[in-house]
Amino acid sequence: MTKNQSENPVVTSSLHLILGGARSGKSAYGERLAKDSDLPVVYVATAQAFDDEMRERIKQHQSDRPAHWQSIEVLCDLPQTLLENSHCGNVVLVDCLTLWLMNLMYQQKDIHQSVTELLHALSQVKGQVIMVSNEITMGVVPMGKESRLYVDELGRLHQKIAQTAPQVTLMVAGIPMVVKGS
């Protein structure tokens, strides 16, 4: 490898982190970006239906996306799912990191190790990756210890992904606000 090649590696993937509050339009924006790419889409869903309301939310998300998209449900093994499904010429849309982290905590997984594995996978993926997550760190500090831990870990996760992502967007009232990139 020449000196010039090592300084300017060929980018084989792109990562776009989309953050926003509840009902900010983040999922719809991520879906629109995936659809507008005109590439095959792999939709990675991380939600678990623990109650009727969540089952309805999941059904709504399923009906909102095109039927020809490949859908994969993942609880904790997001890094491996990304590595197996990201290819040059496709888009992987992850909705959402918020619930993925919740799943890790619920399953009592090692969060630090899981986040490290995710960051490693993101450095290896070949196609476009769009990751959606709730920005919940702008509110008051939660009362309970577990809630504070969750907010802290989600904030750290967002920071780490945002550092590596060429594009970061914050959704506000359905409007994409560019935080990083074009």
Image: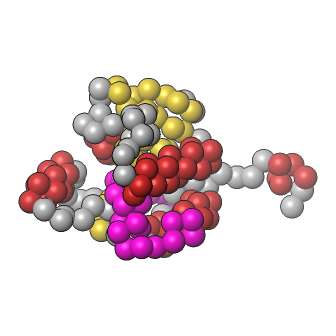
Span shown in magenta: 87-113
* Residue 124, above or below 66: below
Where does residue 40 sit, x and y in percent of width and height? 37, 57
152 on left or right of 36: right
Point 56% across, 33% down: residue: 180
Toward the viewer: 60 or 127? 60
Q: Quadrant of the C terminus?
A: top right
Toward the viewer: 31 or 146? 146
Residue 121 at least partly seen: no
Point 46% across, 73% down: residue: 109
Residue 50 at least partly seen: yes
Where does residue 114 sit, x and y in percent of width and height? 52, 68
Q: Quadrant of the N terminus?
A: bottom right
Point 39% across, 35% down: residue: 140
Q: Is residue 112 magenta?
A: yes
* Residue 9, above or below 175: below
* Residue 76 falls in image quadrant: bottom left
43 on left or right of 180: left
